[in-house]
């Protein structure tokens, strides 16, 4: 299923959108890599939406992150954090 990957950095008001051919892990990581290249750096914390490609089991305190995403985070010297409840602010949001 095709999708649009949209990524937001609320503190810098920067947004990025990219069309991908599916919502699989590989396409999600490709869009994330393109976003970080365009952004010119890696934020300390990334907060993905509860997309199945990113989060295998949602949990407010400690979500189960896809192993490919964990490897990506370790390679990029960042980490993924669970999305906060509505109305809360967060360092970065990822939505695909």
Image (cartoon, rainbow, N blue to C red):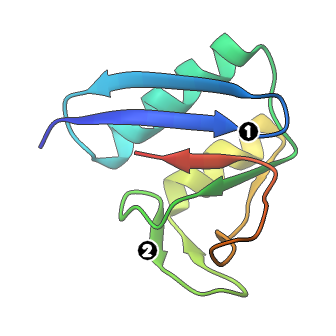
Number of numbered discs overlaid on the protein picture:
2
**Contact (CB < 8 A) between labels 2 and 1?**
no
The answer for how far apart the CA atoms under marks 2 and 1 are is 20 Å
Mark closer to the chain start, 2 or 1: 2
Q: Mark 2 points at which residue?
A: 56
Q: Is residue 26 above or below residue 12?
A: below
* Image-quadrant location for residue 47: bottom right
Q: Horizontal placement of 9 versus 71: left or right? A: right
Could you tell me which secondary element the residue under label 2 belongs to? strand
Give the residue furthest to the front: 87
Residue drawn at x 59%, y 87% as measured from the top left: 59
| Image x and y of residue 31, in percent | 46, 28
| Image x and y of residue 26, in percent | 36, 39
**Location of the N terminus (image quadrant):** top left
Residue drawn at x 47%, y 35% as measured from the top left: 6
Given residues 4 and 10, the one toward you in this image is 10
Given residues 22 and 94, the one toward you in this image is 94
Q: Horizontal placement of 77 versus 59: left or right? A: right
| Image x and y of residue 76, in percent | 76, 36
Q: Name the residue under label 1.
A: 75
Q: Is residue 83 above or below residue 77?
A: below
Q: In this view, does 38 lie above or below 19?
A: above
Could you tell me which secondary element the residue under label 1 belongs to? helix
**Label 2 vs label 1, nearer the camera:** 2
Given residues 80 and 67, the one toward you in this image is 80
Q: Horizontal placement of 52 versus 84: left or right? A: left
Given residues 69 and 20, the one toward you in this image is 20
**Residue density around tag 1, few if under 14, some if 14–19, many if 20 or more, within 10 Å:** few
């Amino acid at each position: 299923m095709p999708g649009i990957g949209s990524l937001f950095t609320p503190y810098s008001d920067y947004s990025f959108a990219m069309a991908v051919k599916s919502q699989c892990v590989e396409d999600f990581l490709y869009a994330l890599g393109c976003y970080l290249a365009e952004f010119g750096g890696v934020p300390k914390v990334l907060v993905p939406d509860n997309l199945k490609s990113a989060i295998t089991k949602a949990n407010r305190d400690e979500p189960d992150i896809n192993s490919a995403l964990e490897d990506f985070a370790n390679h990029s010297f960042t980490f993924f954090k669970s999305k906060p409840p509505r109305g809360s602010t967060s360092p970065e949001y990822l939505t695909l």
